[in-house]
Image (cartoon, grey):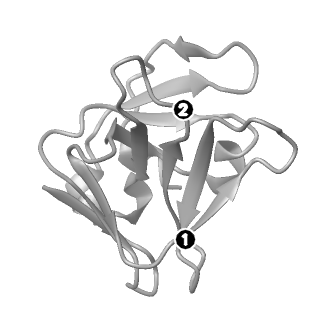
Amino acid sequence: MLTGTCHCGAAHWTLEGDPGSITACNCTVCRRYGALWAYDYVYGRIKVGGPTRNYRHAHKSDPVLEFLFCPTCACVMAWRALIPEPDGRLRIAVNVRLAPPEAVADLPIDHFDGFDTFDDLPRDGRCVRDLWF
């Protein structure tokens, strides 16, 4: 099980099982947050606990997701879909930068062009540790 906590320790997340590859996205929000995402579904393998606040894109009348952050220290914990998939489940992703470094350092990175093409980009062999500095 992977765990992550905000800086002050008030909010946290857990992810059961293999997180798979981690996504680095360059959309207008993710590039500002610098988050690295591991995915699953609400009420699935990911659980978010403690106090959180949410942010939805302020300039969109129909946002598709919201970001969850700690109201005390402002660490970005996760994003959660607002529109269910065809099977009724909601996607969620947690920010693995909040996990202990040794637990996620070797996870491979997938790059997603959320800014321009909305395409997955080819892997370049980097892992989480390569994006820390």
For residue 34, above or below residue 124: below
Q: Residue at x 36, y 41 (%)?
A: 38
Question: Residue 127's spot in the image, x, y percent?
Answer: 36, 37
Report x, y in % for residue 55: 67, 58
Give the residue at x 66% y 34%: 26
* Marks 1 and 2 close (CB-CB < 8 Å): no
Q: Which residue is mark 1?
A: 75
Q: Is residue 70 above or below residue 10?
A: above
The secondary element bearing badge 1 is classed as: loop
Crowdedness of circle 1 by 10 Å Cα count: few (<14), some, many (20+)? Answer: many
> In the image, which is nearer the foreground, mark 1 or mark 2?
2
- Compared across the picture, whether 13 is left or right of 7 comes to left
Please report the residue visible at 26 percent of the width from the left and 48 percent of the height from the top: 43
CA neighbours of label 2 inside 10 A, class few (<14), some (14 to 19), many (20+): some
User: Does residue 30 appear left or right of residue 105 in this picture?
Assistant: right
Q: Quadrant of residue 23?
A: top left
**Residue that numbered label 2 is attached to:** 83
Q: Position of residue 20 (x, y in %)?
A: 24, 32
Numbered label attached to residue 93: none
Say what amino acid the circle numbered 2 marks.
Answer: Ile
Q: x and y percent of residue 65 in the render? A: 60, 41
Secondary element at image label 2: loop
Query: 126 or 7: nearer the eye?
Result: 7
